[in-house]
Image: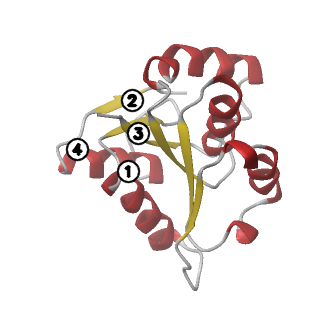
C-alpha cells in the first residue's frame, strides 16, 4: 500500500541556507519518497515551497498541493515554486476559503492530515507552541497517525 504523507512546517526558513534544507530533506524525506508514495503539501512559503522543490527534483512520488483558497492567493514565492514544479504536481486542491485567516489555514492542515497516513513536521526550533505546524502535528496525534518531528 502506498504511503500518504502530510508535510507541515514553518514559513520562517531564512535562518538557514538552502543547502542545509536540501540535506535535511535528503535525510528525513528521502526514506519515505518511494515511487508510489504520495505527499500532501500546503501551498505556502517556507517549508511548503522548499519541500515541494526538493520532492519534485529528487523523487518520483506523487505530489498534491493544497491551498486554503486558491493558488493565486498564495505569496509570489509559493506561486513561483508551484509553477516551476507544475509538471510534477499530480493535483492542486483549492479549498475555496472566502477569507484567509488562521482558521482557514487550520482547515487546510486538517484536510491534509485527513488524507494522509503520516505527518512529517518541520517546526521552528524551540518550544512547542500554538503555530500551524504544531497544530497540524497535534491533529495528526489526535487521529492516531505517526508523526516525525524535525525541528528547523
Disc 4 to disc 2, C-alpha distance:
11 Å
Residues at marks 3 and 4 touching, judged by CB atoms closer than 8 Å: no
- Quadrant including the C terminus: top right
Label 4 belongs to which residue? 141
Mark 2–mark 3 distance (CA, rounded to whole Å): 13 Å
Residue 123 vs 79, above or below: the answer is above
| Disc number placed over residue 149 in the picture, else none | 2
The secondary structure type at the circle numbered 4 is helix
Q: Which residue is mark 1?
A: 136
Callout 1: helix, strand or loop? Answer: helix
- Residue 2 locus on image (x, y percent): 35, 34
Q: Total marks drawn? A: 4
Q: Residues within 10 Å of mark 2 (few under 14, many from 20)?
A: some
| Whole-number angstrom distance, CA of label 1 to CA of label 4 | 9 Å
Quick one: SS at disc 2? strand
- SS category of the residue bearing label 3: strand
Viewer-nearest residue: 100 or 30: 30
- State which tag comes first along the sequence, 3 or 4: 3
Nearer-N-terminus badge (1/3):
3
Residue 87 in the figure: left or right of residue 136: right
- Of pointers 2 and 3, the one earlier in the residue sequence: 3
Tag of residue 96: none
How much space separates mark 3 and mark 4, taking CA atoms? 14 Å
Residue 51 in percent (x, y) is at 62, 35
Residue occupying image coordinates x 55% and y 73%: 101
Q: Are marks 4 and 2 in contact (CB under 8 Å)?
A: no
Of the numbered discs 1 and 4, the one sitting upstream in the chain is 1
Q: Earlier in the sequence, mark 4 or mark 2?
A: 4
Quadrant containing the N terminus is: top left
Residue that label 3 marks: 5
Earlier residue among tags 2 and 1? 1
For marks 1 and 3, give the CA distance.
12 Å
Amino acid at each position: 500500500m502506498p504511503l500518504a504523507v502530510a508535510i507541515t512546517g514553518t514559513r520562517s526558513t531564512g535562518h538557514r541556507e538552502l543547502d542545509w534544507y536540501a540535506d535535511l530533506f535528503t535525510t528525513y524525506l528521502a526514506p519515505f519518497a518511494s515511487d508510489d508514495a504520495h505527499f500532501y503539501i500546503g501551498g505556502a512559503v517556507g517549508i511548503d515551497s522548499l519541500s515541494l522543490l526538493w520532492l519534485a527534483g529528487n523523487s518520483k512520488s506523487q505530489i498534491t498541493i493544497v491551498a486554503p483558497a486558491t493558488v493565486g492567493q498564495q505569496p509570489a514565492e509559493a506561486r513561483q515554486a508551484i509553477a516551476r514544479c507544475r509538471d510534477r504536481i499530480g493535483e492542486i486542491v483549492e479549498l475555496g476559503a472566502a477569507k484567509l485567516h488562521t482558521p482557514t489555514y487550520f482547515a487546510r492542515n486538517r484536510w491534509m492530515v485527513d488524507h494522509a497516513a503520516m505527518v512529517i513536521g518541520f517546526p521552528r526550533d524551540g518550544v512547542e507552541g500554538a503555530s500551524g505546524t504544531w497544530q497540524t502535528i497535534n491533529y495528526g496525534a489526535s487521529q492516531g497517525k505517526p508523526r516525525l518531528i524535525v525541528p528547523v
